[in-house]
Image (cartoon, rainbow, N blue to C red):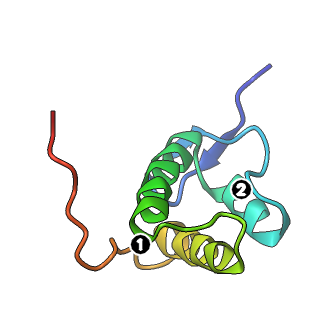
Amino acid sequence: MEQRMVKCVKLGGERPGLARPPVPGELGRRIYENVSEEAWKMFKEHFKMIINEYRLDLMSKEADEIFNKQVEDYFFGKGAALPEGYVPPPSQ
């Protein structure tokens, strides 16, 4: 089966797309149509950092709102900002 290609809004150019929408609804459809598999992996790493920094309960409405805002900013907006005061872990 041939890999589905998308014009990635994050990385530019034609790149392999996701196999299916990663989340339900309109947002999932936009991600599926405009975000490459590689860019989605990058976002998941970014959002893991957000989860840890804000100590989010993934079952909460607040986490859903933050996720949606982060997706919009990361892919379709000005770019997602790091949490205030974030210090990346030292490289090993």
Q: Residue furthest right?
A: 25
Spot occupied by residue 73 in the image (x, y as percentages of width and height): 49, 75
**Residue drawn at (68%, 73%), measured in percent from left and top?**
64
Percent of width and height locating residue 83: 34, 74
Comparing 1 with 55, the one in front is 55
Image check: 65 left or right of 19? left
Measuring 78% from the left and 61% from the top, which residue is drawn there? 29
Q: Is residue 31 left or right of residue 70?
A: right
Residue for point 41% across, 79% down:
78
In the picture, the quarter occupied by the N terminus is top right
Q: Is residue 37 above or below residue 12?
A: above
Image location of residue 6, percent across then percent down: 64, 47
Vertically, is 57 above or below 62? above
Residue type highlighted by circle 1: Ala
Provide the residue designation for mark 2: 33
Camera-side mark, 2 or 1: 1
Numbered disc 2: secondary structure: helix
Q: Is residue 76 left or right of residue 3?
A: left
* Quarter-of-image position of residue 69: bottom right
Where is residue 80 shown, x and y percent of the image?
A: 41, 72
Measured in 3D between alpha carbons, the distance from the residue under mark 2 to the one under mark 1, in whole angstroms, is 20 Å
Q: Mark 2: which amino acid?
A: Glu
Total count of labels: 2
Tell me the quarter of the image containing the C terminus.
top left
Secondary structure beneath disc 1?
loop
**Mark 1 neighbour density, 10 Å: few (under 14) some (14–19) many (20 or more):** some
Estimate how packed mark 2 is, as few (under 14), some (14 to 19) or many (20 or more) residues with alpha carbons within 10 Å: some
Residue corresponding to mark 1: 80
Label annotation for residue 37: none
- Identity of the residue drawn at 54% across and 53% down: 8
N-terminal label among 2 and 1:
2
